[in-house]
Image (spheres, rainbow, N blue to C red):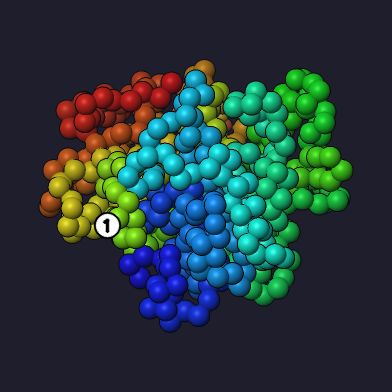
Amino acid sequence: MKYLPVTKDELKQLNWDSLDIILVSGDSYIDSPYSGTALIGRYLTKNGFRVGIIPQPDLHSGVDITSLGEPNLFWGVSGGTVDSMVANYTASKKRRKSDDFTPGGINNKRPDRAVIVYSNLIRKHFKHTKPIVLGGIEASLRRVAHYDFWTNKLRKSILFDAKADMLVYGMAEKTIVQVAHAMRQKKSWQEINGLCYISNEVPENYKELPSFDEVQKSKAKFTKMFHLFYNNNDPITAFGLAQKTDTRFLIQNKPANHLSQKELDNIFDMDFSLDAHPSHSKDGKVKALDTIKFSLTTHRGCYGECNFCAIAVHQGQTVNWRSEKSILKEAKKFTKHKSFKGIISDAGGPTANMYGFECAKKIKKGCCENKRCISPVVCKSLKPTHGSQINLLNNIQNIDGVKKVFIASGIRYDMIVNDKQFGQKYVNSLVKKHTSGQLKVAP
Ligand code: SF4
Ligand code: SF4
């Protein structure tokens, strides 16, 4: 299937009379593993579900949101690849004029607080509809009470504001497939890891966060809440959490297990078209394609723990990396694409030089609660080595048709300094071969 269907005609071409799941997104439909909506849609399809996508629906009529009918199982709602408020405003709170994920590049398609707006749009046009499941970065990072920079206030979990049925957090592939199976079999989904829901009671053995009311009144309680939330993000050690919000509770089940290397490889092995859906072409170019089209995700997760960065509560602090074979296969696929000019824009993850090694203790027993892996000093158990990444980059560069492979993701220099065997060799290799102008240093 070249693209997941976005119109009734495309459903007909597939001989599908209806869809199991409809995904609604604040982005255009870019069929790339860098788009969460495309990736989740393709993964659900691979697991036997019929999935369609409604990209950037019109808010003033029901034309777009009703265009694929009503799903048999659930709606999946995402603000897009970036939180809608970050996508729509600069840090000085000025409206952004451009949007790289909107065809034509003008920022006129994505509403503020998109997951709330889309959930309302669905309910407006479909009374008593199937469950609404929130996902993506906007929902994931707003899953418990949180500070909202745009209003300078605390907000409750976005589940309450969107009045949705469930929120899947993190990268969510495992969770969403389990949810889809549970719904198809009409079984309960409330115990599946990696999701949040609203309940009148707290399940047994769940830890209770300070309530929304308490954190609004006390900064100390907010700090306590954040630490408890932050320290329950490792699938091996986490407890389920609950937070009283008004008269009910936000329930956060423990995180889904990390994907194994084989599972990660299988996801990137799916047959993405690496282009925007053709229906977007009349509205102009999707600029984000310039950077993501020929980029390689080599791994997920980061243990950098820069205090401003939210990656750990979305992707986790354990780095999971793809096999070299899988990455090389994807790079070879690029060389067959009609618009590939020999340049791979990035081979990286949240932090480029975390590829290919992890702390043995962390993999077995989970993250340390009171110790950081690389700050203020690199932990002795980590043993950073850049050997695998040097080999990987060399092998990508040696593929016929590849002229250059760049590192556009940031690098952590503290790990390079700590790698006596390969650190200098890695820097030499980056500077000579893999930097396209600026080398990004993670703080
Ligand atoms: S190293 Fe980069 S990805 Fe990791 S926590 Fe720091 S800023 Fe975030
Ligand atoms: S032992 Fe060190 S490297 Fe391993 S999880 Fe703990 S702090 Fe991180």
Q: Name the foreground residue: 148 vs 356.
A: 148
Query: To which residue does mark 1 refer?
Result: 329
Point out the quarter of the image occupied by ligand 2: top right
Q: Is mark 1 within 8 Å of ligand 1?
A: no
**What number of labels is visible?**
1
Whether residue 189 sits left or right of residue 200 in the image: it is left
Would you place residue 230 above or below residue 324 in this image?
above
Q: Looking at the image, can residue 394 be seen?
A: no
Q: Looking at the image, can residue 189 be seen?
A: yes
Residue placed farthest to the front in the image?
A: 60
Whether residue 332 sits left or right of residue 442 in the image: it is left
Q: Name the foreground residue: 57 vs 399.
A: 57
The quadrant in which residue 151 appears is top right
The quadrant in which residue 76 appears is bottom right
Residue 190 x/y as whole percent: 73, 59
Q: Name the foreground residue: 72 vs 208.
A: 72
Would you place residue 391 above or below residue 78 in this image?
above
Residue at left offset 61%, top offset 72%? 72
Q: Name the foreground residue: 245 vs 314.
A: 245
Residue 96 x/y as whole percent: 43, 31
Q: Quadrant of the N terminus?
A: bottom left
Residue at left offset 70%, top offset 73%? 186
Residue 210 x/y as whole percent: 80, 32
Instruction: Tell me which amino acid carries mark 1.
Output: Lys
Residue density around tag 1, few if under 14, some if 14–19, many if 20 or more, within 10 Å: some
Q: Quadrant of the C terminus?
A: top left
Whether residue 276 sits left or right of residue 63 in the image: it is left
Residue at left offset 39%, top offset 48%? 34
Would you place residue 190 above or below residue 185 in this image?
above
Residue placed farthest to the top in the image?
A: 376
Helix, strand or loop at disc 1?
helix
